[in-house]
Image (cartoon, helix red, strand yellow):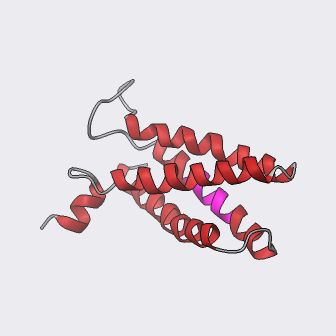
Amino acid sequence: MSYLALAYIHLATVLPAFVIGTVQMLGRKGSPRHKGLGYTYMLLMLVTAITALFMPAKIGPVFFGHFGPVHLFCLLTLYAVPVAYFAVKRQNLRVHKRAMILLYVGGIIIAGSFAFMPGRMLNQLLFVD
């Protein structure tokens, strides 16, 4: 699959995840709506992370000929989603909350900020003539 196709799949999953994550962070917790959106959010974040793992680093240091520092956020996501899921199943809301905040801040806010840096595809699409 081409880099461009992967990038579009990545965007198609991370953009709704950003919206859902924001709604989840600001909304009432524990409702059926929160639970349903939470499952959708976690699935979108997993697809986002897995897709990103197949996208080679194009800026900065490259490890093993493919991975860059931003790929660490994929590992964060692959860690935080199951931790949050199993924590809420065990009714450990403190661990669930911590994992979900880590996922949102690290996986969306910080990692997403990298997408707008000069030389990145999203920066070129939005800001370069």
Q: In this view, does 88 lie to the left or right of 26?
A: right
Outermost residue, front direction? 94
Does residue 1 sit above or below 37 in this rendering?
above
Residue 22 shown in magenta = no
Residue at figure coordinates x 55%, y 69% from the top left: 22
Q: Is residue 55 left or right of residue 88?
A: left
What's drawn in magenta, residue-wise?
40-47
Where residue 55 sits, quadrant-wise, is top left
Q: Residue at x 61, y 42 (%)?
A: 78
Determine which quarter of the picture holds residue 125: bottom left
- Looking at the picture, how far across and down is residue 90, in whole percent? 87, 48
> Residue 11 location, x and y as percent?
44, 62
x then y, percent, for residue 57: 34, 39
Magenta run includes residue 44: yes
Q: Is 47 or 41 nearer to us in this picture? A: 41
Is residue 37 shown left or right of residue 109? Answer: right
* Dominant SS type (magenta): helix
- Relative image position of residue 47 (x, y in whole percent): 58, 53
